Image (cartoon, helix red, strand yellow):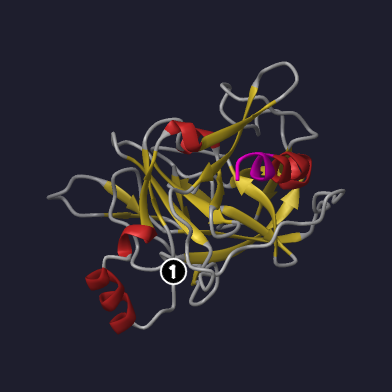
Amino acid sequence: MMKLCLVLGLVFAGAALGSIEKRIVGSKTCGTERQYHVEIMSLQGGKSCGGSLLNTRWVLTASHCAEQMVKVKLAVNSDLPMYKKIWSFLKGSSKVTEQDINTKQQFTYKGEDGKAHDIMLIKLNQDMSAKVPTIQLPPEGCTKPEESKQVQIGGWGAKKAGGTAANSLKCASTEIIKCGENDKPNSNYFSDETTTMCAFKSGVETCFGDAGSAVEYKNLLHGIIVSNPVDTCVSTVVMLDICYYRKWIQETIRANP
């Protein structure tokens, strides 16, 4: 679980705290962008991630973000006026935007060898309103962005594991690069050059809470962040290539109406 930080340096939080925190600088507030962004939190604690609303019933995220009972918060970056949000709460419809999801509604991709990949579909208990923005997938047969292409990433902006979250979603761009030997998901999950892509831009780092969040290219969902730092942020962003999983996404949604 990771949150996006654009880190220029370290600042002392003060002698009383005796800790060092990373300052979130260089990013921009997403504003009305990324209204499809979803927050995913373990009900047992210790996990916080992002995800993407694909349609009224399905969310895409990283496998390691769930695999246990989780709370899914939808429309977290909604631009609905505050009075409408309060009215929804009073009517009880806020239960739709916060749903507890059990493992039976979590679908992790597994290869022919049975090895899990760090990508998961979550089926919601109740449909979201069709008015809540979603993100569009690239067409089947697509290819991942080439090296040097700019992609957009985002995150909720916690400063560190257990830190205070930012009050707004943060957005930034980074550049596709060739993955290094150690640029891969957690060893619990399969990856190779056909499934993984990487990005780097000076000053742009992914931090605790960013995993599972969308990687946009040409306004389409071309990747999800799987790099998962806990105590430090990372400058090379490791992602899974959605084009590799495009057919599986469609088949899983169709098979579980």
x, y percent for residue 56: 54, 60
Q: Tag 1: residue type?
A: Asn
Within the image, what quadrant is residue 120 found in? top right
What residue sits 28% from the left and 55% below the top? 164
Between 217 and 40, which is closer to the camera in this rendering? 40
x, y percent for residue 4: 48, 55
Give the answer, above or below, for where 20 lies relative to 35.
Answer: above
Looking at the rendering, the stretch of residues picked out in magenta corresponds to 252-257
x, y percent for residue 233: 47, 45
Between 177 and 60, which is closer to the camera in this rendering? 60
Is residue 6 rendered to the left or right of residue 69? right
Give the quadrant of the C terminus. Answer: top right
Q: How many marks?
A: 1
Outermost residue to the front: 257
Give the answer, above or below, for where 130 lies relative to 199.
Answer: below
Between 234 and 170, which is closer to the camera in this rendering? 170
What residue sits 73% from the left and 39% below the top? 248
Q: Is residue 207 magenta?
A: no
Task: Sort mark 1 into few (<14), some (14-19) or many (20+) by Cα contacts within 10 Å.
Answer: some
Give the quadrant of the N terminus. Answer: top left
Is residue 14 rendered to the left or right of residue 200? left
Residue pointed to by mark 1: 77
Q: Would residue 7 be seen by someone viewing this image from the given angle?
A: no
